[in-house]
Image (cartoon, rainbow, N blue to C red):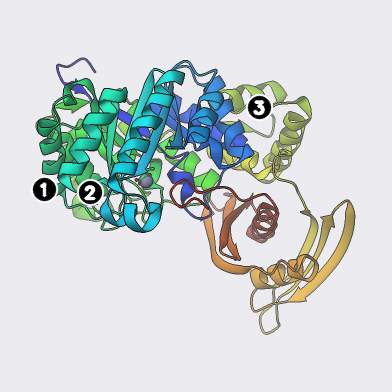
Amino acid sequence: MADNKEHLIIFDTTLRDGEQSPGAAMTREEKLRVAKALEKLRVDVIEAGFATSSPGDFAAVKSIAEAIRDCRVCSLARTLPADIERAAEALKEAVAPRIHTFIATSPIHMEYKLQMTPAQVLEQAIGAVKIARNLVDDVEFSLEDGSRTEFEFMCRVIEAVIAAGARTINIPDTVGYGEPGQYGAMIGRVIKNVPNSDLAIFSVHCHNDLGLAVANSLSAVLHGARQVECTINGLGERAGNASLEEIVMAVRTRPDVFPVSTRIDTTQIVPTSRLVSTVTGFPVQPNKAVVGANAFAHESGIHQDGVLKYRETYEIMRAQDVGWNTNRIVLGKLSGRAAFSARLETLGITFDNKADLNRAFVRFKELADKKREIYDEDLQALVSDIQFGETAEHFSLIAMDVASRTGRAPHAELTLRAQGNDHQVAADGDGPVDAVFKAIEKLAHSGTSLQLYSVNAITTGSDSQGEVTVRLEKGGRIVNGQGADTDILVASAKAYLNAINLLETPDRVHPQRGV
Ligand code: KIV
Ligand code: ZN
């Protein structure tokens, strides 16, 4: 949109902060798919991960840096030289690499978490920015727990890191404590007080513990912030981050209030939201603004009448502007391999080898036999459902038979494959899903506890695939397993097995807790 507004940088952290939500871990292939969707959405910066966290995270940041051409690609790093060097290495092939380094600056974090004095924190912050600037031109510095940091110290740190070469200064509301009026005014006051603030872009990163993340971010924009860090569907630590779709649509719908515009292709919002929901297993609540299933549904007769007569009586945004109604039938039973691969490519899905493409095509044909109309969402779920060698498949489902009859305990018989051998297991349960999980446990003995079980229809219609999420916890670690199938019991078995398989993968370092 050509206008005379200032540019608001949209920094997407779905793949980093979003992925820190318990159970939201994605595989390298899934992260790459989300990154390509974010590029299509036209975010300015993709925070691809925390490269030091694990070899898998490093590989994901590297793949994204190699594949993305139209966005800056960023890796998070603590203010430790090894973290910063690892980030730079992962970003080597990026067209526009950014290192985002951070340290906590609030009294409570410095004393109890870091056990460092303010002077030590200041020195480490300056040193980190200098190291990062020797490796890349674009360095962002964050004052973790910024909203609870003492004002004078915050200004001192910011002035020093700008002098050391940071060109984006992020003041996070790490614990979601901010209140819109106060937080926005604080950002404005910092910009006014720091003598060299004109050399940097000021950024905000708000968590949603009080449900104020979007309001706090927008208030900061009104006080001079020109970068907002946000996530698709508001995914993120605890109650999540500011939701990208809400920030973008607020700014676009209220140009009379906000002096900024973004370069986002808003028609990609809903497809990206669905993709993130599918790969993370975090469903979108129906009444979620912009991307919830009810966001544009006018149920009551009075509303419908109003909308039919004149749309703007009840609608402030158009559904098609955010990508609703793009739920097109893309493939069917007669579609061949060429059409299948072409459609996957449009969705940003590519395979490292032909064997994976063949497996995906076989699954597509099986699905097309059960379901006449195949949508993009079905393809995304199908690809997520296949294990591409990254997640070791310790257990897989070969066959199952479940009996559920009134007045009798449901009974499940499964054939499972473990390390190349097939095993028959059977169990009764309180319900058919319970019977399936109990049968799996007879072989797996996983020692986990079930935290959440949810089923969602991927598309509309009673032949829709059910997408099941199973969240398991073991020794404090939480994973989300997913499975999709037109038979929800099969999807449930796959999701449970996927979660158990994920628990076999190595855990990683958390950037803010160091574990
Ligand atoms: O919430 C936070 O403070 C963060 C920082 C690492 C930017 O995620
Ligand atoms: Zn955060």
Kind of element beneath mark 2? loop
The residue that disc 3 covers is 340
Kind of element beneath mark 1? helix
Comparing 354 with 133, the one in front is 133
Q: Position of residue 139 (x, y in %)?
A: 37, 25
Is the residue under label 2 in contact with that under label 1 (CB below 8 Å)?
A: no
Instruction: Decide which of tag 1 and tag 2 comes sooner along the chain.
Output: 2
Residue 378 seen in the current view: yes
Comparing 330 with 237, the one in front is 237
Is the residue under label 3 in contact with that under label 2 (CB below 8 Å)?
A: no
Classify the position of the N terminus by image quarter: top left
The disc labelled 1 sits on which kind of residue? Gly
CA–CA distance in space, label 1 to label 2: 17 Å
Label 2 near ligand 1 (CB < 8 Å): no
Callout 2 crowding tier (Cα within 10 Å): few <14, some 14–19, many ≥20: many
Left or right: 197 in relation to 342:
left
**Circle 1 or circle 2, nearest the eye:** 2
Instruction: Decide which of tag 3 and tag 1 comes sooner along the chain.
Output: 1
Residue 429 vs 367, above or below: the answer is below
The residue that disc 2 covers is 149
The residue that disc 1 covers is 181
The disc labelled 3 sits on which kind of residue? Phe
- Which circle marks residue 163 in the picture? none
Q: Position of residue 114 (x, y in %)?
A: 39, 51
